[in-house]
Image (cartoon, rainbow, N blue to C red):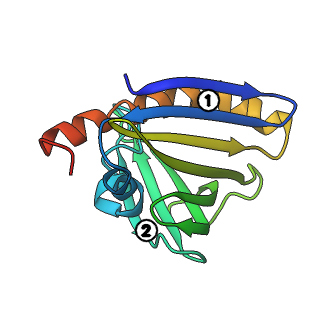
Amino acid sequence: MPVLDVEKDLDRLTMTVTAQFAAPVERVWRLYAEAEQVQRHWGPPGWPATFLRHDFTPGGGSHYFMAGPDGEQAHGVWRILAVDEPRSFELEDAFADADGNPDERAGWSRMAATLTPTDGGTRVALVTTFRSTEQLQQMLDMGMEEGLQQAMGQIDGILAEEGAPA
């Protein structure tokens, strides 16, 4: 499994997921920057993601949903804050309705991703910062930690379909 570590810091209201992939930074970058790539791994197994909109540029945004095995849909939106291709990106994430309107009651979280070249691949660190202890706990209770690990666990399979790292 590519996930190396999950660290929760309740004082800083963060959860950091670190993973390692056997592909160059430029290839791993595409897994987030391109809609047809990110939707292949963003939802955990059993909850695949569909990106209805994905403008991965500063000031852009995304609207996606994950579909459960019983047809249930969980919609989300991203506001893209910063992009430094292929090294890092930062976005805000929120639940949304089916039209892509954010659920302001649940609040926004912030995700900062860093992609670092390593011997034989790329290390990805996703740091999610929450607005409150309550929001962090709610997301943990909903299975965010396990969901991110499972979602990132699908990336090796995507890379393997393409053969040698590109």
- The residue located at (55%, 67%) in the rendering is 83
Q: Is residue 114 above or below residue 51?
A: above
Give how far apart the Cα atoms at labels 2 and 1 are: 25 Å
* x and y percentages locating residue 107 in the rendered image: 75, 52
Q: Is residue 100 visible?
A: no
Are there few (<14), some (14-19), or many (20+) residues within 10 Å of tag 2?
many
Q: Residue 91 got which mark?
A: none
Three-letter residue code for mark 2: His
Helix, strand or loop under label 1: loop
Q: Is residue 81 left or right of residue 62?
A: right
Q: Is residue 148 above or below residue 65?
A: above
From the image, tell me which residue sits under label 1. 142
Three-letter residue code for mark 1: Met
Of badges 2 and 1, the one in the foreground is 2
- The residue located at (75%, 29%) in the rendering is 137
* x and y percentages locating residue 135 in the rendered image: 77, 39
**Which residue ends up furthest to the bottom in the rendered image?**
59
- The residue located at (32%, 48%) in the rendering is 24
Quadrant in which residue 142 is drawn: top right
Are there few (<14), some (14-19), or many (20+) residues within 10 Å of tag 1?
few
Q: Residue 54 got which mark?
A: 2
Q: Is residue 33 above or below residue 126?
A: below
Q: Quadrant of the N terminus?
A: top left
- The residue located at (14%, 46%) in the rendering is 162
* x and y percentages locating residue 95 in the rendered image: 61, 52
**Which residue ends up furthest to the front in the rendered image?**
119
* x and y percentages locating residue 127 in the rendered image: 65, 42
